Amino acid sequence: MLYDETRLGASARPRRRSPAEGSAHLTAPQTLARRRSPPTVAALLLTSKSTPGKTRPLAATSRTHGEPNAHGRRRPGAVGWGVFGGLALSLAANAFLMRASRAYFREENAVRLDPGGLDAYAHAPPPREGKPVLVFFGDSRALMWGRPRELQDYEVVNRGVGNQTTAQILLRFDADLPKLKPAVVVLEAGVNDLKTIAEFPERGAQIVAECESNLRRIVQRCREIGAGVVLVTVFEIGDLPLWRRPFWSEDVRSAVREVNTFLPSLVETRVILLDAAPVLDDTRGRIRPEYQLDYLHLSPSGYSALTEQLGPQLRAFAR
């Protein structure tokens, strides 16, 4: 705005400049910048970042969005492949979680229908005759021991059931063992009781006491049916995976050691103790890495090492 000098006074009012007057005091670059129209969005999108000042079609210059093929169709670039890969990974993860969840709920409901696992070996064939029967009895640690070929003096039968506590193992005793007429029972159980201390720390002492009581009753039942017992100490816990650490407690390891301290009190005539720690543990008091399948279970080499110790122990029952 400029004031009309001929009418300058108290009541003077500003008048508008003409375009020519408005630009008269500007320098040449400022005038050129003022007259230049601002770039449109389309122009910005069509400008290549690699060659400033030149305008070329973005589809032909940007590899991020792909380039046209021989048929004129745009091929996916880095962004397209990244989106596709992320989508595929998400679908695969969802499928895995769905399958894992279904397996978990199926197993949980199966336990409700058959708390003792009485159907696990309901239709299993009887052992072959001719040799004394040796039964691996207990939880998944007993189950994964299998039927070692090294024990050639026995007809080996396995009656382990995964995830079972000592209460469940005791519950299915009469369904699984008496009909086999075992000469020897190798008992490995207790870890599934003790690992629940991580979820119920306030019940730790009760869980340990019930585990010890159930193990005592299982040993008594074995003796009542005329079987000798190899009582294997509860294997130590291995190295925890990252996903398990937020839901774990070191009180579980303490409980394992407490139960193992109790087990020698069950030794009597035809009941012997196989201490797994000297065979399996490292200097930290944990399962050696080469013997770990996971933090709860042994690898085949771990079971082979235990079987080597079991063989000489069985001679006590041949007398």
Image (cartoon, helix red, strand yellow):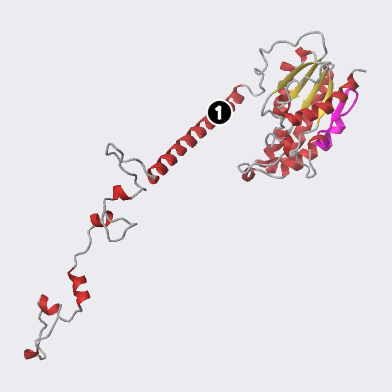
**Which x, y percent locates residue 231?**
82, 28
In this view, the residue farthest toward the left is 6
Residue type at mark 1: give it: Ala
Quarter of image, res 47: bottom left
Residue 70 shown in magenta: no
Q: Residue at x 72, y 44 (%)?
A: 251
On-image quarter of the N terminus? bottom left
Q: If the image is split into quadrants, where does the C terminus sit? A: top right
Report the front residue among 226 and 99: 99
As drawn, the residue found furthest toward the top would be: 129
Q: Using the image, determine if residue 308 lies above or below residue 290.
A: above
Which residue shows up at 74% across the image and 41% down it?
253
Please say if 194 is above or below 111. Answer: below
Outermost residue to the front? 70
Q: In what element is the residue under mark 1?
A: helix
Location of residue 117 (image quadrant)? top right
In the rendered structure, which segment of residues is drawn in magenta? 260-278
Q: Which residue is mark 1?
A: 103
- In the rendered image, residue 271 lying in the magenta stretch gets the answer yes
